[in-house]
Image (spheres, grey):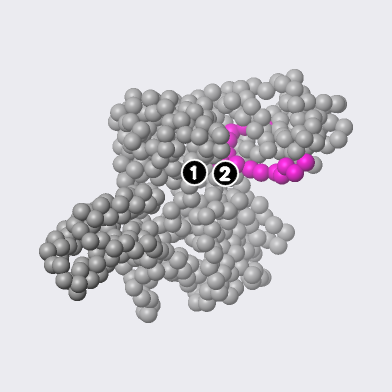
Amino acid sequence: MRKKLISSYEDFEREYRDVKDQITDIDVYEDIDFPTFEMMEKVKDNLACEVVTEEQNIFKYKRSKTIKILVASILLFVIVGEFAVLKSSFMDSFNITKGTSQKKLEDKSDEKVEVFKGNDLSVYEKAVEEFSKKQGYNIVKSSAINMNIRLPKTFDEFINNVNIGDTLELEKINGLSKQFGYDFKKYLGKKLALYAVNIEKNNTNKGLLITLIYNNNIVGAWISEKDDLQNIIKTCKENDDKNISTQQALDNAKDFIKRYFNSDETMKNIITKDKETNYVKPTYELKFEHSTVKVDAQSGKVIGYDTVNSAKSNKSLSEQSLRNKASDYYKHLGFPTEFENNASVINTDGSICADFSQSIHVNDKTIYNPYNSVRIILNSDGTLRGIVSFYKPLIFTDKSNNILISEDKVKTYYAGVGHDKGVSNFQIPKLEIVVPNNGDLIYSESYMKENPTAVYSEEDYCRLAWVAKGSDDKRSMMLYIDAESGEVIGAAAYK
């Protein structure tokens, strides 16, 4: 760190302003409450009084004392700035976490940590629900999408020679937001929470409402047009915050094991993940002696369980009894009440896999979302064997979902990905929820010749699509055709 000798109050004032400006530029400082500049000003005034006093003394030892005071003051303000950056990890080391109802410095007793359920997310939900009602809308159940984003610094910011603001049409979106009374221009460059929900009025779907939230207050709101949310996710998404500490995750996992298995296992290690392939939220994965438990790092809820020892029992429940047991576990574990048990499979060993999924209603049909679902796995005697959670947000504006795909159009799509010979054996396209991918490019011979190093990749969200299956003289393939835009958004091989 640079140290600077200061010999006058003017020098001190100039150096203080410089340090303060540096602290102002710290990226994360805007998102915390401590320390405040008001507190810094008080410290500075006290130090400045000593500077003025010492200026009047010309003796060498007095001048040395002044220098020491001023160097200490600069150190103080730099430390204050660095403390602001390190605050979250510092507090976490003492288990003092935003959104908890208890502050726990040591865990030398058997007392359990209470997880605070009224975290920031519930504040977002309430704010958006109140706003929707004022506009005359109701929120469609289980349609919420929430994440952290950082907006570009300007409406026409360039990143890697790409005009991000223009790609997102931010200025146009801000114009739509102003119609609801929110101008988010002053929040450009800041970290915000995005909360989106489908809305309806008089039992008629009215689209996707997107809101921007800063310090628990709505600062932007508009009804989505075209690909707003997809583009924001691709361009502006940041890693979501972890609302609970590692200690809380451990306590919740131990409580789960004790409650459902009456066991006290020793934890071997814990892994923090910002997202996984099928669960794009931050998680803690805790490995114990005989099992692995996954905890959502935002809600503190147990969302995954796996054991190395599958219980064997001579007792076997009926299929209906197992389904009822799976539903009971699902409810007791606190998963979304709006999800429906849409599929149950009995395995050869008598165990059951029961899926509970988000659903949407389109054209008088119910379509289930396998990418926002929970799978409960029970042994044949009804004991819990495993839990698997899936989460990729469904982006569905719900405005133009009556696109009919003709056979000629499907042939055109197949030809576009290099399958231009003998396309036949078409099945009637079906509406399904899929994850967009670049499979249509990977399966294209012409594309791969030009891009031999290209690899398969998926998006972090899902869409409603027409799944069109067909085959040619080389392979069988299904194309994903977006039900709202009519564009190809991926492909996959099938047998």
Mark 2 or 1: the one toward you: 1
Identify the mark at residue 117; answer none if there is no mark: none
> Foreground residue, 17 or 456?
17
Under mark 2, the amino acid is Asp
- From the viewer's side, name the closer residue of 401 and 15: 15
Task: Give the residue pinned by disc 1.
Answer: 237
Is residue 302 one of those drawn in magenta? Answer: no
The quarter of the picture where residue 139 lies is: top left
Q: Please determine whether, in this image, residue 247 is positioned above or below residue 209.
A: below
The answer to whether mark 2 and mark 1 are in CB contact below 8 A is: yes
Q: Left or right? Give the position of 72 relative to 282.
A: left
What are the residue bounds of the magenta stretch? 452-467
466 in the magenta segment: yes
Residue 49, horizontal then vertical, whole percent: 13, 61
Could one spot residue 400 in this view of the protein?
Answer: yes
Say whether residue 205 is visible.
Answer: no
Residue occupying the point 60% across, 37% down: 433
Residue visible at 55% across and 71% down in the picture: 269
Residue 381 drawn above or below residue 483: below
Q: Residue at x 63, y 57 (%)?
A: 352
- The residue sitting at 48% across, 57% down in the picture is 296
Badge 1 marks a residue whose secondary structure is strand
**Rendered location of residue 354, percent (x, y):** 59, 52
The correct choice, above or below, for 427 with respect to 120 in the image is above
Gap in angstroms between the C-alphas marked 2 and 1: 10 Å
Please give the label number shown on residue 460. 2
Which of the two residues, 444 or 190, is positioned nearer the viewer here?
190
